[in-house]
Amino acid sequence: MSTAKHFHHAHHFDSAEHQYDASKQGIWLFLVTEILMFGALFVGYTIYHSLHPEIFHAGSHHLSVPMGAFNTVVLLFSSFTMALGIHFVQVDKKKEAIIALAVTVLCAFTFMVVKYFEYSAKIHHGLLPGKFFVNTEMADIKNAAMFFGFYFVMTGIHGSHVLIGAGLIIWVMIKVIKGEVNSSYYTPVEGVGLFWHVVDLIWIYLFPLLYLVG
């Protein structure tokens, strides 16, 4: 017998369908602002890359393509497990949903552990933005710190979104465990899933722009 709780829409909505549609519109509007923010960074990257291609080519050689590729696979797999989690919630497979969401969180933390090692290597070699750049190998390249300014800003903002996404997925997991999210009400897990897919999509653009540009 299903233990799913029945969902009652909020009083200011005409029906559950009305609340669902309004929630989805709100989520999409929020995601548009996220895309606009990263879009501005991509535009800035494109402009400076066109003006100083040699800086970006040289800088990218100091990034670990295997680490970047590994993280790409991790996030792509996490999108799959997130989609599975949403599906299992929609069909009231509580145990399977929790497992799929937990694996997604594990992927998020795996991604961040890899970023930690990447950042540590950059800091150790003085590959930092602005006045903190002290790498001797690129000392003969004027404004070499520019590339690493883009690298740390773009991957740093993206990494913060990965952590926020992991926190939201954990929040959804708790609601699934409590029976507050189920086949009759799955808007939270769908919304978090959309956010997670956008975070993954942004990385798919970041990986070639930063790691493969050279």
Image (cartoon, rainbow, N blue to C red):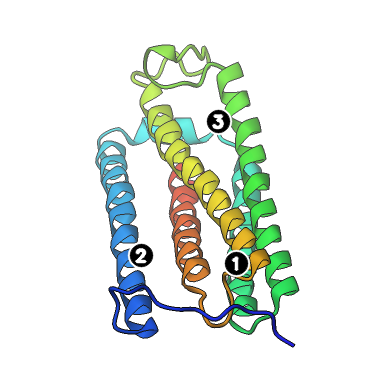
Percent of width and height locating residue 206: 45, 48
Q: Residue at x 48, y 41 (%)?
A: 160
- Identify the residue at horizontal 74%, vertical 88% (top origin): 1
Q: Which residue is mark 2?
A: 27
* C-alpha gap between disc 2 and disc 3: 37 Å
- Kindly state the secondary structure of the residue where label 2 is placed: helix
Question: Residue 190 location, x and y as percent?
Answer: 49, 70
- In the image, taking residue 41 as reference, residue 194 lies left or right, namely right
Amino acid carrying label 1: it is Met
Name the residue type under label 3: His
Disc 2 versus disc 1: nearer the observer? 2
Q: Please, what secondary structure does the residue beneath circle 3 have? A: loop
> Residue flagged by tag 2: what amino acid is it?
Ile
| Residue 168 visible in the shown view | yes
Q: Earlier in the sequence, mark 2 or mark 1?
A: 2
User: Which residue position holds label 3?
Assistant: 62
Compared with 183, 95 (above or below) is above
Q: Is residue 25 above or below residue 183?
A: above
Front residue of this view, candidates 139 and 6: 6
> Between marks 1 and 3, how big is the CA–CA gap?
32 Å
Relative vertical location of residue 144 with respect to residue 6 in this rendering, above or below:
above
Nearer to us in this view, 105 or 42: 105
Residue at image position (34%, 84%) is 15
